[in-house]
Structures are given as C-alpha cells and as structure tokens.
Image (cartoon, helix red, strand yellow):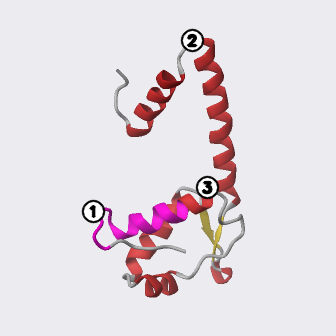
Amino acid sequence: MISIDPASSVPPYEQVRSQLARRITDRDLAVGTRLPTVRALAADLGLAVNTVARAYRELEEAGLIETRGRAGTVVSAAGQRGRERVLRAAHAYAATAREHGLTTEEALGIVRAALTDTPHP
C-alpha cells in the first residue's frame, strides 16, 4: 500500500501523506474505503505513531479522509468532489487559454508556475 524511503530527503509523514493523497485522487482508494488505524500503519511501516497521525491529520484537513469514531478512518466523498471541481476548473482554464490564443506550452507553463507559486515569465 505505502512504502517509505528512509534515504529520501522527504520526511516520512509527507511520504505517507502524499502516497495516500495520490491513491485517493487517482481513485485507487474509493470513497468509504477504510484505512488502517494509525497504530497499525505505523507498525507496518516501522514509523512512530505520531508520524502517521500527522499524515492522517493533514489528509483530514485537506478533506481527503474523515475519522468516524469507532468506524475508523475512511476516504471522504469530499476528496472526490474536490477532484471533480479541479477537473471542471481545468476544462474552463483550457477553454480560456484557447480563447486568448495561448499555446499548449504557454498554458502549461502558467499552470506549473501557479502550482509552484513562482512568477510566470
């Protein structure tokens, strides 16, 4: 499910968070899928409980997962709705870029700059 690269400069909590987020947004994990408990995942990955708890907390803040008490932590429908909103926004952006005569590379350059918070040339 998830693998940790101990040699990576990326902190372990971020490796857990990003891999789960990717699986959720790619729909590898369906809405309602129950995730392992924090303790179980920490044990499986050889990480501290607080490390996995931080990853889960950030995923919950992003609306990708939700904790349902005794029912555990599950993939949230809000995460899928967010993906659908982004897809609609992407289509609208593509239409606007075409209307203004931007090339594909120019349009993608603007998106890349926006994603990395760098000014577009």
Task: Indicate the quadrant where residue 22 lies.
Answer: bottom right
**Mark 3 falls on what kind of element?**
helix
Residue under pointer 1: 9
**Circle 1 Cα neighbour tier, 10 Å, few/some/many (<14 / 14–19 / ≥20):** few
Number of callouts: 3
Work out whether residue 78 or residue 12 is closer to the camera in this orientation and state it. 12
Foreground mark, 2 or 3, reads 2
Seen at 58% across and 62% down, the residue is 23
Occupied quadrant, residue 79: bottom right
Residue 105 position within the rendered picture, expressed as x and y whole percent measured from the top left: 48, 25
Q: Residue at x 49, y 29 (%)?
A: 108
* Residue position marked by numbered label 3 in the rendering: 25
Q: Earlier in the sequence, mark 1 or mark 3?
A: 1
Separation of disc 1 and disc 3 at Cα?
24 Å
- Residue 47, percent from left and from top: 38, 81
Q: CA distance from mark 2 to mark 3?
A: 31 Å
Quadrant that contains the N terminus: bottom right
Residue 107, percent from left and from top? 51, 24
Q: Residue at x 47, y 61 (%)?
A: 18
Cα distance between the residues tagged 2 and 1: 40 Å
Q: Looking at the magenta stretch, what is its main secondary structure?
A: helix
What span is in magenta?
6-21
* Residue type (three-letter) at the residue carrying disc 3: Thr
Asked if residue 15 lies in the magenta stretch, the reply is yes
Quadrant including the C terminus: top left
Amino acid beneath label 2: Gly
Residue at image x 62%, y 40%? 86
- Circle 2 sits on which residue? 101
Mark 3 nearby-residue class (10 Å; few <14, some 14–19, many ≥20)? some
| Marks 1 and 3 in Cβ contact (< 8 Å) | no
Residue type marked 1:
Ser
- Closer to the chain start, of discs 2 and 3, is 3
